């Protein structure tokens, strides 16, 4: 039976910053329009965090029963390492999805944005289908596309819209920046797993385009994130503070471009997660300052 620490590790806390960033940026964009609602922001944060935990347990379950985790390095694999039964890990995923749905329904009810039910249901479906079901899109090289859409565009723009009932340039460009940094986390994770995924038949984007192209794409995500901030700063110069949030990217970029493989990429994964968090917080603060300095 898995210990509490192993269950926590199985939730893959290093990926959780990807859930914080969109809420910080989306709320900052709402502040620019003077329509921010901290209560709605907290509910959006709970939804985002619970979805991330749910998708992590779902991945552990689905990859574990397929045998994909058998040769992997990195975080604890509850099913793959025989630490917990598949049924218990699947239950943990569904519990996280249930509470994500509950918090999401509360947010939608309070905000009155009922069409967000569609986005919420699609988010839960996408979280499960990444590695779950008969034809998981994570095995087809589409993981990065869905991560960009749901942990970037949907999460950020949904946060802004439930608060402001409209969108602005800051929310759209911020969503792009947040999305590409979420993609960077997945890229370095899949770069590390290329050998095992190749053997297991998991055709991630990293497996499809190869080692070198994956490393180049990883670095390009940070360039796009910087350009997103620059685009916002054209309209709101003080928002350039968001660029400070990219400083932690130096370590993961250097590690990835050095040719590190396997376990040596674990610090890069941690650094990518940290950068996602600092970027989201810094840009969120920058957007708040647009509001506060008027």
Image (cartoon, helix red, strand yellow):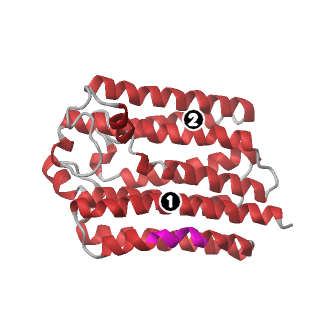
Who's the residue at 34% across and 39% down the image?
10
Quadrant the C terminus occupies? bottom right
Q: Is residue 260 magenta?
A: no
Q: Is residue 249 left or right of residue 280?
A: left
- Give coordinates of residue 119: x percent, y percent: 56, 39
Vertical placement of 235 versus 287: above or below?
A: below
Q: Is residue 170 above or below residue 81?
A: below
* Mark 1 nearby-residue class (10 Å; few <14, some 14–19, many ≥20): many
Magenta span: 243-249
Select label 2 or label 1 by which is in front: 1
In this rendering, does residue 270 appear at all?
yes
Rendered residue at 32%/31% (across/down)? 3
Magenta part mainly helix, strand or loop? helix
Q: Residue at x 44, y 35 (%)?
A: 125
Disc 1 secondary structure class:
helix
Q: Which residue is mark 2?
A: 118
Q: Residue at x 62, y 49 (%)?
A: 23
Pointer 2 or 1: first along the chain: 2
Compute the Cα span from label 2 to label 1. Answer: 26 Å
Mark 2 element type: helix
Examine the rendered structure and indicate whether residue 52 appears above or below residue 195. above
In percent of width and height, residue 222 lies at: 47, 70
Q: Which residue is mark 1?
A: 276
* Occupied quadrant, residue 103: top right
**Residue 52 - label:** none
Q: Residue furthest left?
A: 199
């Amino acid at each position: 039976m898995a210990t509490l620490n192993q269950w926590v590790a199985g939730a893959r806390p290093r990926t959780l910053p990807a859930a914080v960033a969109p809420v910080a940026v989306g709320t900052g964009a709402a502040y620019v329009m003077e329509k921010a609602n901290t209560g709605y922001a907290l509910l959006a944060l709970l939804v985002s965090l619970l979805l991330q935990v749910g998708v992590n347990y779902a991945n552990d379950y689905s990859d574990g029963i397929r045998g994909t985790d058998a040769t992997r390095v990195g975080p604890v694999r509850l099913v793959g390492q025989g630490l917990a039964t598949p049924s218990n890990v699947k239950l943990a995923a569904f519990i996280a999805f249930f509470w994500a749905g509950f918090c999401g329904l509360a947010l939608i009810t309070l905000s009155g944005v009922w069409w967000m039910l569609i986005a919420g249901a699609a988010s839960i479906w996408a979280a499960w289908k990444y590695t779950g079901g008969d034809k998981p899109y994570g095995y087809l090289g589409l993981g990065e596309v869905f991560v960009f859409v749901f942990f970037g565009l949907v999460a950020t723009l949904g946060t802004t819209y439930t608060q402001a009932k409209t969108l602005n340039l800051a929310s759209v460009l911020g969503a792009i920046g947040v999305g590409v940094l979420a993609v960077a986390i997945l890229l370095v994770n899949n770069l590390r797993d290329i050998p095992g995924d190749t053997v297991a038949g998991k055709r991630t984007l990293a497996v499809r385009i190869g080692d070198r192209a994956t490393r180049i794409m990883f670095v390009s995500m940070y360039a796009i994130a910087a350009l997103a901030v620059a685009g916002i700063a054209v309209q709101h110069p003080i928002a350039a503070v968001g660029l400070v949030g990219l400083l932690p990217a130096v370590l993961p970029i250097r590690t990835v471009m050095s040719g590190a493989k396997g376990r040596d990429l674990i610090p890069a994964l941690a650094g990518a997660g940290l950068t996602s968090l600092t970027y989201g917080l810094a840009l969120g603060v920058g957007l708040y300052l647009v509001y506060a300095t008027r």
